[in-house]
Image (spheres, helix red, strand yellow):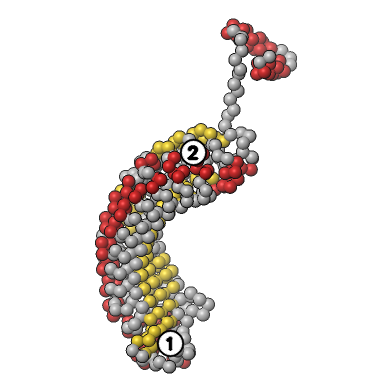
Amino acid sequence: MAPMEKAERDALYSTIQGFVGDWWNGSDLYPDPCGWTPIQGVSCDLFNGFWYVTVLNIGPIHDNSLSCAKILEFRPQLFELKHLKALSLFKCFESQHRHQVTIPNANWEKLAGSLESLEFRSNRGLIGKIPSSFGALKNLQSLVLLENGLTGKIPPDIGKLNKLKRLVLAGNHFSGHIPDIFSALGELLILDLSRNSLSGTLPLTLGSLTSLLKLDVSHNHLEGNLLKEFAYLKNLTLMDLRNNRFSGGLTLSIQEMYSLEEMVLSNNAIGGDIRTLKWENLHNLIILDLSNMGLKGEIPESISELKRLRFLGLSDNNLTGNLSPNLSTLPCLNALYVSGNNLTGELKFSVEFYGKMRTRFGAWNNPSLCYPLGVISTSHVPYGVKPCQQEIKLLKSNTTDGDVKRTFHSIASLSHTPNSFWWIFLFFLISYLGL
């Protein structure tokens, strides 16, 4: 059985005590932490015939995981685990008002040769800034700081992490501009900066992330035009820019993002004409949400060519014209929202379409849109859409203008006599039948 160096074991015990409390006596409970008494959340590997810690997960991930104490700390012994590849802290620093903790700025360079994954998730009591010393972690492939209490600006030093594949800084309180640091991050696959207070424009070097699969900067205060450099993101499958302050219309570069499966641009004052893009180019789209963007024009027929589309959101724009019945032929569509526009005319979808969509079809607040009476059952009538008014067409007859005037004069006089309703009804019936 391979041994474990005493210095490594002592560093492990002290590190864990810093997070779970001094009551935890590792030497008694787990005398052989990489052998016959393993610790939940700790993984080891052999180096030169000795066991070394490679993975340390603290927090309630599993029933028997190490749970964090109310008062806890990063101990310097953490940085003595010289073969540590992955460090994860989940729901450890939970208090937002008491016992708050900051990430230490010093000593991260000691883990530069080994650390590949660093993840702090759901730690509301973890406050302060991202240490600039994270830039020394040259082998880091995953940096996830998700839903913590972190503040300040995103440090430019992150741009030195050229092996990074995943950068997730979502759900914090970061502010300031997104630094223009992406030219050296060519291996990045996931970039998620959503749910912060970031401002300014998107950096142009986003276009250098040619391997990127997911881009999410939603729920910030970002502004400016959509980037022409989006055209270089040929592998991107998800782009979520919702709830920002972007403007300047739909850039043509979007129609060159052929791999897009989900595109969400809603709640931005982007404006412009929805017909600007060749929508048929985005043939992989599954989710398309363009709600509340100030778009104008008629809904392009080319959207009906997106055969993989499941969700189409076009609500709260200034769209005009008729709603194409071809949208109902999309084989995968199960949600269509066009409410709050200026659409006109009669809905010409099939009964089966309304039965399939039910409440997932929304077309209210289109004052000049209507549905045909007698075609749709009352249980499938679209909410907030009025019935179409049926026109009464009088058949042509040989009656002269003078006769018509005399006839209507007679009807008018009849209206003042008893049983006038029946006389008028009989007249229209005879006129309709051409008798």
From the viewer's perspective, is 76 left or right of 318? left
Q: Quadrant of residue 16?
A: bottom left
Examine the rendered structure and indicate whether residue 175 appears above or below residue 306. below
* Residue 392 x %, y %: 60, 23
Examine the rendered structure and indicate whether residue 358 appears above or below residue 73. above
Residue where numbered disc 1 is placed: 34
The quarter of the picture where the N terminus appears is: bottom left
Which badge, 1 or 2, is on the more N-terminal residue? 1
Do callouts 1 and 2 mark residues in contact (Cβ within 8 Å)? Answer: no
Q: How far apart are marks 1 and 2 (CA)?
A: 65 Å
Residue where numbered disc 2 is placed: 324
- The kind of residue on which mark 2 rests is Ser
* Residue 148 x %, y %: 40, 67
Q: Crowdedness of circle 2 by 10 Å Cα count: few (<14), some, many (20+)?
A: some
* Residue 410 x %, y %: 66, 9
Q: In which quarter of the image is residue 239?
A: bottom left
Q: Crowdedness of circle 1 by 10 Å Cα count: few (<14), some, many (20+)?
A: many
